[in-house]
Image (cartoon, rainbow, N blue to C red):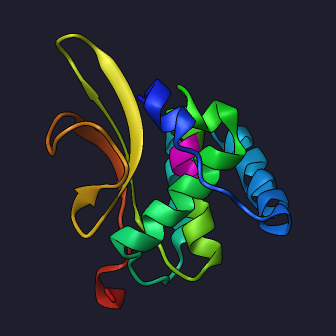
Amino acid sequence: MSTPEALAARTHVPFGRRMFVRVVVGVARVLAKLPPSRLSALMTRARGNAPAASAAQALRAREEVTSTSLHCAGEGCLPRSIATALLCRVRGRWPTWCVGARLEPFLAHAWVEAEGRPVGEPFQDGYFGVLMRVPPRADTAA
């Protein structure tokens, strides 16, 4: 769901951090190949007890992922969402990780939310029905 404008608006990520983000993206691309039930279980486990990420923290992670990986900046929404959530997690926070779809016309998508809103996405709230969701733990809200 990224647009050509989003590809052009890449942020600078320093070399050391870019290498780390590439490792996270590589892990995300492997995880994206798992069956949905296994992926959901792993994302739930990865969340641990991390408190909720703010919208700014989630957006920063998403921008670093899309600036580091052309695949994630383009149509790779599942690895992009996984990498964004994992990058937040290594920083001690967790956004809400979501996978959903719409029926007419059919379109599946994966994204992260923070503060109750999709982060860095061009669609409005409720555009996709949520099929899988891994929110931060309710008792650890920031």
State the image coordinates of residue 55 (x, y, percent, origin top left): 35, 69
Question: Can residue 83 be found in the magenta stretch?
Answer: yes
Quadrant holding the N terminus: top left
- Does residue 106 show up? yes
| Magenta segment includes 11 | no
Residue 21 on image: x %, y %? 74, 58
The answer, for residue 42, to whether it is visible in the render is: no
Q: Residue at x 61, y 79 (%)?
A: 91
100 on left or right of 86: left
Residue 17: x percent and y percent?
Answer: 78, 67
Q: Which residue is painted at 52% across and 71% down in the image?
A: 47
Task: Tell me which segment is drawn in magenta.
Answer: 80-84
The quadrant in which the C terminus is found is bottom left
Viewer-nearest residue: 62 or 141: 62
Compared with 90, 122 (above or below) is above
Give how far across and how far down residue 92 sits, in percent: 57, 83
**85 relative to 106 in the view: left or right:** right
- Identified at 61% across, 37% down, the residue is 72
The image shows residue 16, relative to residue 130, as above or below, that is below
